[in-house]
Image (cartoon, rainbow, N blue to C red):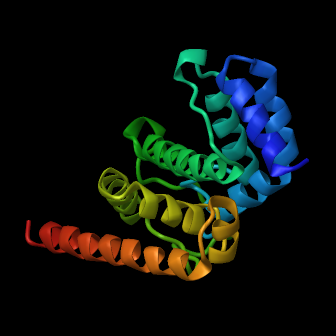
């Protein structure tokens, strides 16, 4: 199915045709599944949902939206950008719930043969992940375009070339905007760590 057909189905869904969402998602399911795998890659297993569960959560959130709250997506890329942000929000909410005392807080379930606290390379501790999430939300308020690019690159695992194809624009512009957005996040994360350490 062509990108324009997916966009048209999403437009019908935004106009109140509930079944159009299922049709649109079925057409891009493999891409969304790949994106959900990228979104969960490297995350601690006790902090995040499985790729399938994450994708299902985002789908249910969309399906349950009242017709008056549905938004139109001007392109397939805009839908994927929305999916990236929804996946990140879902992961953060799930991680926060898991860290609550009623769910065991910082306690982790261990098997008898598990070695003590080995962190896999590339895994980010939950506190840092939440800080990054909050800073990315700040960036959405300041510069939504760059925040969207960062979400697509790091939440969905898309390359600059794929983002350029999905959203339009050149690969060099995408890379430049990613660098600028990442510099902002890095600077703000450093500031928050300094403030945290001085308390």
Location of residue 87 in the rendering, given as x and y in whole percent from the top left corner: 58, 48
Location of residue 171 in the rendering, given as x and y in whole percent from the top left corner: 61, 79
* Observer-nearest of 173 and 36: 173
What residue is rendered at 41% in x and 54% in y?
A: 106
- Give the quadrant of residue 113: bottom right
Is residue 191 shown left or right of residue 23?
left
Tally of numbered tags: 0
* Observer-nearest of 113 and 155: 155
Is residue 186 shown left or right of residue 153?
left
- Give the quadrant of residue 34: bottom right
Location of residue 73 in the rendering, given as x and y in whole percent from the top left corner: 62, 40
Residue 132 vertical position relative to residue 189 in the rendered view, above or below: above
Residue 145 vertical position relative to residue 93 in the rendered view, above or below: below
Residue lying farthest to the left in this orientation: 199
What residue is rendered at 69% in x and 55% in y?
A: 36
What residue is rendered at 37% in x and 77% in y?
A: 180
What residue is rendered at 39% in x and 71% in y?
A: 181
Location of residue 152 in the rendering, given as x and y in whole percent from the top left corner: 58, 62
Does residue 43 appear anywhere in the picture?
no
The quadrant of the picture occupied by the C terminus is bottom left
Residue lying farthest to the right in this orientation: 1
Does residue 103 appear anywhere in the picture?
yes
- Give the quadrant of residue 44: bottom right
Residue 58 vertical position relative to residue 91 in the rendered view, above or below: above
* Observer-nearest of 72 and 111: 72
* Observer-nearest of 33 and 14: 14
């Amino acid at each position: 199915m062509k990108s324009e057909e997916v966009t048209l189905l999403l437009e019908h869904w935004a106009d109140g045709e509930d079944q159009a969402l299922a049709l649109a998602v079925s057409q891009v399911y493999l891409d969304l599944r790949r994106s959900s795998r990228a979104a969960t890659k490297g995350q601690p297993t006790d902090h995040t949902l499985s790729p399938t569960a994450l994708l299902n959560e985002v789908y249910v959130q969309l399906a349950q939206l009242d017709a008056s709250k549905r938004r139109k997506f001007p392109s397939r890329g805009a839908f994927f950008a929305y999916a990236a942000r929804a996946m990140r929000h879902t992961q953060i909410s799930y991680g926060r719930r898991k860290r609550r005392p009623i769910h065991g807080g910082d306690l982790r379930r261990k098997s008898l043969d598990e070695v003590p606290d080995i962190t896999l390379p590339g895994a980010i501790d939950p506190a840092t992940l939440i800080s990054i999430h909050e800073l990315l939300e700040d960036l959405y308020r300041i510069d939504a375009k760059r925040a969207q690019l960062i979400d697509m690159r790091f939440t969905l695992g898309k390359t600059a070339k794929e983002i350029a194809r999905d959203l339009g624009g050149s690969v060099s512009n995408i890379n430049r905007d990613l660098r600028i957005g990442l510099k902002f996040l890095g600077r703000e994360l450093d500031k928050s760590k300094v403030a945290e350490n001085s308390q």
